[in-house]
Image: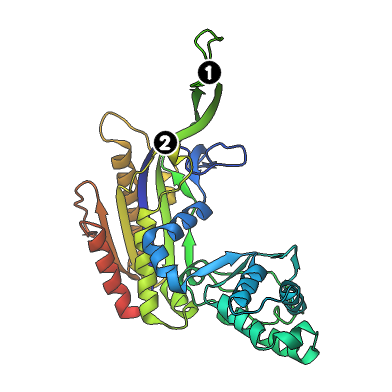
Amino acid sequence: MIIELHMLQNFAPSCLNRDDTNSPKECEFGGYRRARISSQCIKRSIRRDNNFASLLETRGGVRTKRLITQIVKRLNDKGLKDDGIGKTVADVLKEGGLDSQNGETGILVFLERGALADFADTFQKRFEPLAKGDKEARKLAIKELGDILAQSVKAPDIALFGRMLALKPDTPFGKNSLNVTAACQVAHTISTHKVGVEFDFYTAMDDLKKPEEEAGAGMMGTVEFNSACFYRYANIDCAQLKKNLGDDKELTQQTVEAFIRSAVNAVPTGKQNSFAAQNPPSFVFAVARNSGTWSLANAFASPVRVGDSGDLVQKSTDALLDYWGKLVRVYGDGDIKLRTAFSLDTLEIKGLDDAANLEGLINRVNQAIAVDC
């Protein structure tokens, strides 16, 4: 089963996600400039939300280049104080195929948090022969470390977002199946309407400046910002998620629920101290289907325009649901098992289950995946 999530979220003036020039990210869509929030930014906001973060406290993954220092720290905690610990760890990992420089691995290693302790245990039980360069000890240790890397993927965030370790295939580690196919897709968020960039000119006064000194600000500058109603889309392949989690049905259901809650709560942190654009979604629409996926972004190929009647959010909702109806009419809805939504405004739409609120939507999704997950 595939779960799809469609949302409309109207943000007040903000600079939620910046490019390399500190401008709000944009893109061209339908021949018009749109505000954009990157997929990576949205996924980070989801991972950092309390609902998802609490699920990851014990079973979550960790991305790091500091694998060596983390192993050394754990070995020190176990009583090993040898000055050459770091070098021994680095040498063994390098022989396995994971290069390092200045104590950091050459790539970000994404693994289940508990695997760090497993790495330390492997080094502890045969540290002396490893430090002396014993070939047989290194061979056994590298085999164990490779197995740990291969098995350290049963974490909700790794299962959802996937893992790629760019290791040479002819190395001991590289020969293992270390990459994980992501069970979740998150689209770049785009505005439903065309957007231009605005500039906030600011000044800061010197509080200790004497009255008789030259008038003027202590500093001045500009901050670019925009305001937009965004369309957000994500989907989860429950079968792939369950496979990635080692066929753990309960954890699969917990992960889907945590993802939905956190996706609804996700607000990027960019320039929030300056703008405080803390605006929750105005419309959330969830779909459960046996196969196929439909992004509804093309509902906004022609930008939404505000006229005499209706506001931007209302017109965006109407455009989205009108496009959904067209897709159903042309392609059918035989594979669709659930379509449920809630809105800040009252919805009376034929064929759409009104969930009333977030809890109602999550309950309906849980019931759908309980049957097929």
Amino acid at dot 1? Ala
Residue 365 on image: x %, y %: 30, 68
Which residue is at a point 71% across and 90% down the rendered structure image?
Answer: 140
| 68 relative position to 30: left or right | right
* Label disc, if present, on residue 217 of the rendered structure: 1
Which quarter of the figure has residue 332? Answer: bottom left
Amino acid at dot 2? Phe
Quadrant of the image containing the N terminus: bottom left
Query: In the figure, 78 relative to 73: above or below?
Result: below
Residue closest to the eye, 12 or 36: 12
The secondary structure type at the circle numbered 1 is loop
Query: In the figure, 234 relative to 74: above or below?
Result: above
Res 138 visible: no
Q: Residues within 10 Å of mark 2 (few under 14, many from 20)?
A: some
Residue 36 on image: x %, y %: 49, 44
Q: CA distance from mark 2 to mark 1?
A: 21 Å
Residue 39 on image: x %, y %: 51, 54
Q: Residues within 10 Å of mark 1 (few under 14, many from 20)?
A: few
Q: Nearer the viewer, mark 2 or mark 1?
A: 1
Which residue is at a point 75% across and 70% down the rendered structure image?
Answer: 99
Residue closest to the eye, 182 or 336: 182
Which residue is at a point 41% across and 73% down the rendered structure image?
Answer: 238
The secondary structure type at the circle numbered 2 is helix
Give the residue furthest to the top: 212
Residue closest to the eye, 181 or 288: 181
Residue closest to the eye, 99 or 336: 99
Which quarter of the figure has residue 230? Answer: top left
Q: Dot 2 corresponds to which residue?
A: 275
Q: Specify which label sits upstream in the sequence, 2 or 1.
A: 1
